[in-house]
Amino acid sequence: MVFELLMRWLKKRITAKGNERIARNLINFFRLIFYCFLGIVELGIWGTNLLSILAGAGFLGIIIGLAVQQPLSNFFSGIYVVMSRIVRRDDIISINCIGSGIIIEGKVSHIGFSHTELIDKSGKLNVVPNNVLVSSILIRHDRAKRHKWR
């Protein structure tokens, strides 16, 4: 019951920022983790040997974690981008990708879990992974420059 109240509060908090789809996906992710934890506790109550189950789950977790390291990095960076609101839809931003010398400038058209989409002055779509967005130098332009993009 406490868990469901916490999930409702989190959903209201994220939905208030205008991200209903992200809120729904995040809530489902947390529910999956919670019910897996409850299943392990229930198996322990029934007298099942949890040591071998947890050791196998830990080994499987390491293998899966290494296999999906990049998508998970983008996912958690996406959660950070949405929750911290470092960029918002219709912002004009410049991204200086450290180490590569690439500078991407455009208007934010979509912020998702794995990537953020920018439309540059020529109308081309640039898809920037969220871990690149978080780890780069980011410049948000003021309203005067924003009017030039319309």
Image (cartoon, rainbow, N blue to C red):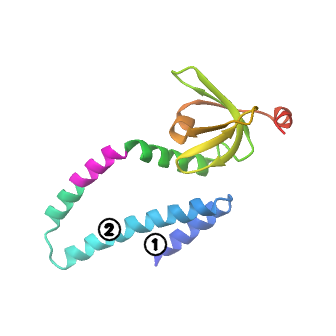
- At 63% across and 43% down in the image, what residue appears? 117
Give the left or right position of residue 107, taking residue 115 as reference: right
Give the residue pinned by disc 1. Answer: 3
- At 82% across and 32% down in the image, what residue appears? 145
Q: Main secondary structure of the magenta part?
A: helix
Q: Residue 32: where, in percent of width, then height? A: 40, 67
Q: Secondary structure at mark 1?
A: helix
Give the residue pinned by disc 2. Answer: 37
Depicted 104 relative to depicted 127: above or below: above
- At 58% across and 66% down in the image, what residue appears? 11
- Mark number displayed over residue 130: none
Q: Secondary structure at mark 2?
A: helix
Give the left or right position of residue 71, taking residue 50 as reference: right
Which contiguous range is marked in magenta?
59-68
Q: Amino acid at mark 2?
A: Phe
Does the magenta portion include 108?
Answer: no
Give the left or right position of residue 130, taking residue 43 as reference: right
Does the magenta portion include 66?
Answer: yes
On the image, which quarter does residue 41 sit in?
A: bottom left
Q: Nearer the viewer, mark 2 or mark 1?
A: 2
The foreground one among 87 and 104 is 104
Residues under labels 2 and 1: Cα distance? Answer: 12 Å
- At 55% across and 37% down in the image, what residue appears? 134
Q: Amino acid at mark 1?
A: Phe
On the image, which quarter does residue 31 sit in?
A: bottom left
